[in-house]
Amino acid sequence: MNQNQYNLISACIFTLVGLLHMLRVFNDWNLIIGDWGMPREVSLFAVLLLGTMSVNGFRILRRK
């Protein structure tokens, strides 16, 4: 696996997970881990973080 393939796969995974968190927020899905219910704010932060990471990943691919 070369660097371009790694960057593409990483950016796609970040995008997919970010979209799933966005769906969780908009559809008001509950996420329970053990006894703890994850607040929506955590998913909102995850959407921002993963969105930034995926955009940067695609920018790196575009530069090469």
Image (cartoon, rainbow, N blue to C red):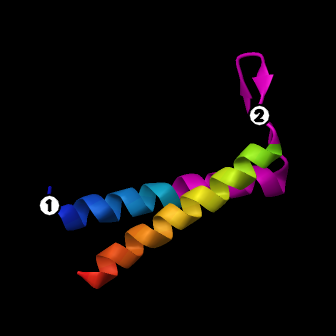
Which residue corresponds to the image point at 32% horizontal and 65% vertical from the top-left?
Answer: 8
The disc placed on residue 56 is none
Residue at the right extreme, as displayed: 28
Mark 2 and mark 1 in contact (Cβ < 8 Å)? Answer: no
Instruction: Give the distance between the C-alpha atoms of the residues marked 1 and 2, in whole angstroms.
Output: 36 Å
Circle 2: is it few (<14), some (14-19), or many (20+) Cα within 10 Å? few
Is residue 18 toward the left or the right of residue 44 in the image? left
Identify which residue, 2 or 49, lies in the foreground.
49
The quadrant in which the N terminus is found is: bottom left
**N-term-proximal mark, 1 vs 2:** 1
**Quadrant assignment, res 7:** bottom left
Residue 62's place in the image compared with 5, above or below, is below
Is residue 1 toward the left or the right of residue 16 in the image? left
Report if residue 19 is visible in the image. no
Which residue corresponds to the image point at 74% horizontal and 54% vertical from the top-left?
Answer: 44
Mark 1 residue element: loop
**Residue 53: percent from the left, percent from the top?**
49, 62
Question: Which range of residues does the magenta coloring cover?
Answer: 16-39
Identify which residue, 30 or 42, lies in the foreground.
42
The quadrant in which the C terminus is found is: bottom left
- The residue at which mark 1 appears reads as 2
Mark 2 residue element: loop
Three-letter amino acid code at the position of disc 2: Met
Give yes or no for residue 33 being in the magenta stretch: yes
Residue at the bottom extreme, as displayed: 63
**Quadrant assignment, res 60:** bottom left
Is residue 52 toward the left or the right of residue 33 in the image? left
Circle 1: is it few (<14), some (14-19), or many (20+) Cα within 10 Å? few
- The residue at which mark 2 appears reads as 38
Identify which residue, 49 or 38, lies in the foreground.
49
**Quadrant assignment, res 62:** bottom left
